[in-house]
Amino acid sequence: CVEIQLGLASECEKATLSVKRRLACEQVSYFSKAHYCLSGCDTSDSYGKKLLLFLKWKCMDAKAVAYYYHALVLDKGSEPTNHISAVCCLSAADDILAESKRACLSFCLANPITRVPPPWGIMKNMHKKIPDVAYKKFQIYGHLFEQDKKSALQSLPDLPEFPLSLRPEDYEFPGTDSIWENVDCQPQIQSLKEHLEDETEESSK
């Protein structure tokens, strides 16, 4: 839900940078908590491992966007330290975006193998915006780094934390029906060859 809200806000001219930053930071919190909770579960099967890789990838995407909007908010300040912090955030966003692309590839190559999806949602624009804005801002404020390199390297601020606006309702899964304990009722998994042979037989009829 937050990912959809952020995508809509990014295209809305009336949405302020503060609102976009808040949604991006909330998205980081949701994906981070989901990854943390799933890490404590049994993920020995391939689907569990793939889901963990998916959450890691999405969390990196969210962090890149959060640092991007945090940088734009900081850049509104008038002090040189504001501009230095903004450039550091943009640089961090660019680095995280590169890591996110590698995480996406790891997710796709994990069993079961899937195709690499094209950028979608807010990331469709961020793949171009983040490196472009990071480069332009460094061109403008690069002289501030030269004046005080030590403080510039230490000026990456933490992302702000906001109370989460969406809270999931408690839910308990219903009990398993006794019929599933019967071996004969277990789903039969066919190989691809068997599946194709069945289709051939049906078509010949």
Image: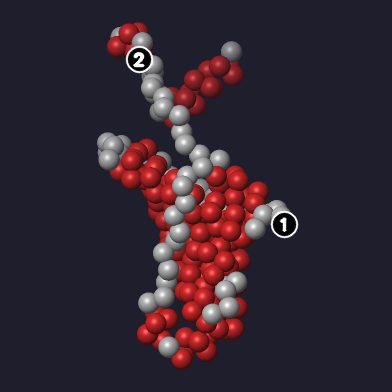
**Residue type indicated by callout 1:** Glu
Q: Is mark 1 on a helix, strand or loop?
A: loop
Q: Which residue is drawn at 41% across and 86% down?
A: 149
Say if 85 sits above or below 11 in the image.
Answer: below
Mark 1 and mark 2: Cα distance apart in space: 48 Å
Given residues 32 and 152, the one toward you in this image is 152
Relative to 87, 175 lies left or right: left
Q: Residue at x 43, y 49 (%)?
A: 29
Pinpoint residue 133: horizontal percent, then vertical percent. 59, 72
Pinpoint residue 9: horizontal percent, then vertical percent. 65, 51
**Residue type indicated by callout 2:** Gly
Given residues 169 and 176, the one toward you in this image is 169
Q: Can residue 68 be seen here?
A: no
- Mark nearest the camera among 1 and 2 is 1
Q: What element carries label 2?
A: loop
Mark 1 — residue?
13
- Displayed quadrant of residue 17: bottom right
- Colouring of the image: secondary structure
Pinpoint residue 7: horizontal percent, then vertical percent. 62, 50
How many residues crowd around disc 1 within 10 Å: few (fewer than 14), some, or many (20 or more)?
few
First of labels 1, 2 by sequence position? 1
Say if 128 sits above or below 200 in the image.
Answer: below
Mark 2 — residue?
175
Q: Can residue 41 be seen here?
A: yes
Say if 70 sits above or below 205 in the image.
Answer: below
Relative to 181, 83 lies left or right: right
Q: Which residue lies furthest to the front in this view?
A: 78
Q: Which residue is drawn at 35% across and 15% down?
A: 175
Q: Residue at x 37, y 38 (%)?
A: 47
How many residues crowd around disc 2 within 10 Å: few (fewer than 14), some, or many (20 or more)?
few
Q: Residue furthest bottom?
A: 147
- Displayed quadrant of residue 21: bottom right
